[in-house]
Image: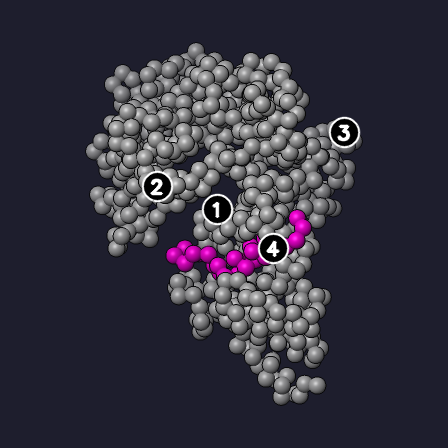
Amino acid sequence: MHTISDRCSKVSELEKLFDSGEPWAVKARDFIGSQTDELQFSWSNLLRHCSGDKGSAPKTKWLKEVEPLFSAVGDESFLSFLNECLPLLKEKRTDEDPDGDFNRSFDDYSIVYAHNNAGSDVLQGLIWLCDTFNDADTATLMRTVAADMFSKIPLVGPRNAKVANAAAMCLAKMQGSHGLRQLLDLRAQTKYKRATSNIDRCIDKAAELRKTTTEQLVSVIASDYELSGVGYKQGELGEYSYLLALIGNGRSSLTWSCTKTGKVQKSVPQTLKTGHVEALKQLRQLDKSIKLASSSHVKRIEGLYRLQSDLPFADWQDQYLDHRLIGFIARRLIWRFSYENCVVDAIWQDDQFVDCSGKVVEPAPKSLVSLWHPLNASTEQVLKWRTFIVKAEITQPFKQAFRETYSLTDAERKSQVYSERFSGHVLNHLQFHALTDQRGWHQTLGGQWDCGSQNEAVIGIPAFGTSVRFDARGNDDYGLVAHGYYATVLTGRLTVDVDGKGGDLENVESLIYSEIMRDVDLFVSVSTIANDPEWRERHRDWYKLTAGELSETAKTRKQVLSALIPKLKIAKQLKIDGKFLEVEGKRQTYRIHCGSGSVFIKPNSRYLCIVESRKKANVMLPFEGDEMLSLILSKAMLLAADDKIKDTEILSQMGLEVSNVE
């Protein structure tokens, strides 16, 4: 028996663990207070134990000691506590001037998001116990907690890294598929680099526990979200049927059809908004989930270039071609099928495999399958694939047929240990950081503090034993931006290390070297200040830069434009002239640079600032992801009909007034 003084002592301890300014803690205190005396005592024992281990993972002794305490509380009470309290973690504090032990990074403005360290210790311990549950609801709750706590607080970092990491690792350790699928969804919806790195470690741990590779684990466990077919979901609600279909990376369309009249509409029918609220909510959640997952899988599949991985045909067919979500991506890509001495390159079209000539082919059932890369094909084959993709109006999920390739230059062979191909460029610092993050590199933001000018980008490619460093230094010439970061960086040399034996560039696998250089070309060509009109008054050579020589990325863009022009309604008004797309307008002739997208008016190359055009080119692009290509086409559409332009800022630059054009 427990004496009254014992129980009072235990309950008083809870006051120290639950911060009255945190909504979840108030709910937790109320929940435990509503339990029987015996359960209150059991809960106090469990919570006290959970608060005792402040490490990043539970120790064996801790796990052994917690078992009887966990059993005393019971699954029913434990899960009820979690479901009532954890959803409130995302809420802000209710007190204005909290007094407690908090992460020191929180300041007066961000303190409303802070959780008391004592409460975080308790939460971590409770979440450590959740991997014993394998149900979908608990997995969903853990994903939600991790997402909320990984959310980035400016100048602080993740809102509560301790709780977020515990929830993500819980998903990795759960038996069955529910936890893993929620972990993959968490990875897909998370953009914050520090958070994604931690989530990736959890995914790697899940693979280690199951004695498989991360790529194999992700491929096997990937959810198809109960889609009706490859890339779509059909169903009925009330008197309407719906079609939810993927139309691109992270993009979908939802259409409704009345079963009585056959009338099709894009907006949700009014009768369904009131009569089927919960079903609509679930459908919207499905829409959100498949868009996030499709974007995540596109990035993962493109990442196969950095892995030494081939799949047996049967496994590839199950995990890629016929998978109802991933198949939407895989069927728009070219694959290489290798069997003994026979190699077949093919894409899926009209329910069959075809080669670059459109000829039907049949890969051997025992083939090993890998993602096709233009570096492993002849120039003739690459050109044929590009022609086929454009003619068939296939939009590939990423640049594959039109992918740029890079080989060692004479200067790089001479230097042996470094490349200066992309040195000396002035880049927008924050944009450079965002791009490196998207491509899986790590780049350090810096400012005018100790070592703050060392802003290099680095990446490791373990499958090939290669690490890469692209030097960049903070540029004092153009000042600082938000939070004291340098506005620009100046790029330097690129160096590599292979298997820890030094940095001879010729030791890097040719495909990996090409992919490295492609990333760096992307960083430079996209984040260069030459692309930003706001810099024309700040950089003395801006006009020279914005109309400079084309990068490999821009050269590919030029080739794509050449292939697309015949398909446009304004084809007769367009032509490629050197580095430019020339547009014959009704009033004047314009030249759009294929790299920067800058517009110049002939005959004296007067710069014309068009920040963004709302006019969209109605043409199927051969790949996704090149925003500059879309921008150039939209500018061409606008300028081809320059007699209809009403924008006063554009007209004034052209030397016209609104009254003269109406």
Q: What residue did someone put label 1 on?
A: 191
| Nearer mark to the viewer, of 2 and 3 | 2
Residue at point 70% right, 79% down? Answer: 38
| Nearer mark to the viewer, of 3 and 4 | 4
Per the rendered image, the range of residues in magenta is 153-177
Structure colour scheme = one colour
Residue at point 57% right, 75% down? Answer: 48
Q: Secondary structure at mark 1?
A: loop
Inspect the image, locate mark 3, and give the three-letter code of the amino acid beneath it: Thr
The answer for how far apart the CA atoms under marks 2 and 4 are is 36 Å
Q: Which of the marked residues, 2 or 4, is nearer the chain's N terminus?
A: 4
Residue at point 63% right, 40% down? Answer: 220
Q: What residue did someone put label 3 on?
A: 261
Q: Which of the marked residues, 3 or 1, is nearer the chain's N terminus?
A: 1
Vertical arrangement, residue 521 with respect to residue 58, above or below: above
Q: Is residue 8 left or right of residue 446?
A: right
Say whether residue 130 is magenta: no
Which sits in the foreground, 516 or 112?
516
Vertical arrangement, residue 5 with respect to residue 336, above or below: below
Q: Which of the marked residues, 3 or 4, is nearer the chain's N terminus?
A: 4
The answer for how far apart the CA atoms under marks 4 and 1 are is 23 Å
